[in-house]
Amino acid sequence: MNDENTWVMIPARGGSRGLPRKNVRLLGNMPLIMHAIRACCEAIPTDRIVVVTDDDEINSIATHAGVRVMREEETTGKATLDDVATKTLPFLKEMGARPEDIFLTVQPTCPFLQSERITQAQALFAEGAASVISVVDDRHLGWRLGDDGTPEPDYTARVNRQMLPPQFRETGAVIGCRIRDLMAHGTRIVQPIRLLEVSKEEAIDIDDFSDWAVAKYYMDRRNVVIRADANRTLGMGHVFRALAVAQELAQYKVTLLTDRAGALAFELLSQSPFDVFEVDGDIGFLDWLEANPADLTILDQLDTEPDYMRAVKARSRNVVTFEDLGPGALEADLVVCDLYKNLDVPEDRQLTGISNAILAPSFETLSEPAPFNDTVSNILLLFGGTDPSCLTEKALTALEKARYSGRCTVVIGPGFGRDLNLETYGLKGEIHQNLKYMPGVMRKADLAVSSAGRTITELTSLGIPVLCLCQNDKELTHTHASARFGVVNLGLGALAEPTTITAHVQHLVDNIALRRTLRTRALHETSGRSNGAIIERMLARLDL
């Protein structure tokens, strides 16, 4: 359908009881009605858009926007939109409208209507529709009153909402017909009718202050992009942290991206309720960001280069990078490094220390630390999602040499990729892979043997003493893997002899006072830490 055959009426009274002067009230720094006008102007020539109003201010706004205005006497608001549409026809005829032309009503109270919906409505008319009505899927378990007033279910089977058949509710955003049908029937609803489904956001129709609050939420909701990569070298910690950050920012529109080369990351991220996309490395990420500019971009991919960071900043209002010791960190708006400081980045552009450690959301709901037992009856082994240095096997060998008789719990991640059997080491216990609820397993541990990543902060937040074996040289710089935080650090795990690990395990098992001291230090250093507080500090630094 040629857009020159389509006319749009935007009815906009000056009065409103539920929300005074709502059509001129500022939403997103512009009058409410301007959102509808702009959407229409992107799809229809301005001289075929008519604002019908009884108000001088609305008249001025519409005229300044370049659309036509049809003035009417001050109204009570009791006239139906079919009545208003019918009264508009002579005005449209004077401008050249023909009986076969399309006539659309677009409500100014639906500020999130996208221009492509008007184009889609035109296509439905071209396919034979006599009327087009915008709707939103609003399925729920409903009830109706029978003839005698008795409540009756408005459904055939009581199932979850998602399993119900679609139930469409009119949004009021767009209703259209052909001019000849409106002239003949006095209504815009003529068979055959076609439904134009819109999103929940586009379905917002502002009538009162509660609707306005929802509209402001959507208008002010920022676009947040989080990139987190994972592989055997990087491990899975970046992905888990990205999910935790995304959950704290879920009031915004959050999109997660990951390098296509890390299949494990995409699989894990896709289990979240957020939009997830794969990109081809840095170039693919920049291309995606170019097409989808962000208010805030969060990078969790370790060290960055200046050119890459500058390219990201050109596509995002704010950029935050995690655990970044690369020269690109100097270009970021904020660096978050709970494990170490980037000595080249000014203090006012950096959040450091264990108080800024993001943990899995499941740790946020715990009300108390793990219980302390004088006897060590359960030792927990955790070496990240991939354990590239095979520290799990080395620790099991050490426990075997110590003739440890208690239970041993081993947690391995999705990228572990090696066969593991506790009986091989003469140990009893269990092995968990892809564990869904980590705190439940950690709380049962009396002692943990772990690498120096984010897992240590999770353990110390529960007051569990830790014997640490670092996976790589970078982990050697992690400041939280020390006695101050309740951790005994043996340095690089690849260089630690099983006999050395055995001796330290035996010492910790036998020395109750030492374990109590480590527990006290761990709980002291992690007291008051929360993901929510970290995100608030981050947004405050960025003035968001």
Image (cartoon, helix red, strand yellow):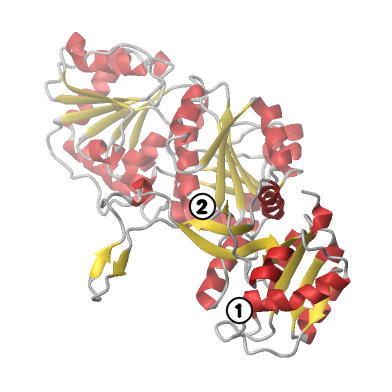
45 sits left or right of 328 in the view: right
Dot 1: few (<14), some (14–19), or many (≥20) neighbours within 10 Å? few
Under circle 2, the secondary element is loop
Q: Mark 2: which amino acid?
A: Leu
Q: Mark 1: which amino acid?
A: Thr
Q: Quadrant of residue 444?
A: top left
Q: Which residue is rendered at x = 26% and y = 51% of the image?
A: 157
Coordinates of residue 348 in the picture (x, y in percent): 64, 53
Q: Residue furthest front?
A: 184
Under circle 1, the secondary element is loop
Q: Quadrant of residue 14?
A: bottom right
Q: Which mark is residue 52?
A: none
Specify whether residue 357 is in view: no
379 sits left or right of 273 in the view: left
Coordinates of residue 78 in the picture (x, y in percent): 59, 85
Viewer-proximal residue among 259 and 409: 259
Q: Which residue is mark 1?
A: 80
Q: Nearer the viewer, mark 2 or mark 1?
A: 1
Viewer-proximal residue among 63 and 182: 182
Coordinates of residue 280 in the picture (x, y in percent): 64, 25
Specify whether residue 124 is in view: yes
Vertical comparison of 342 with 113: above or below: above
Q: Quadrant of the C terminus?
A: bottom right
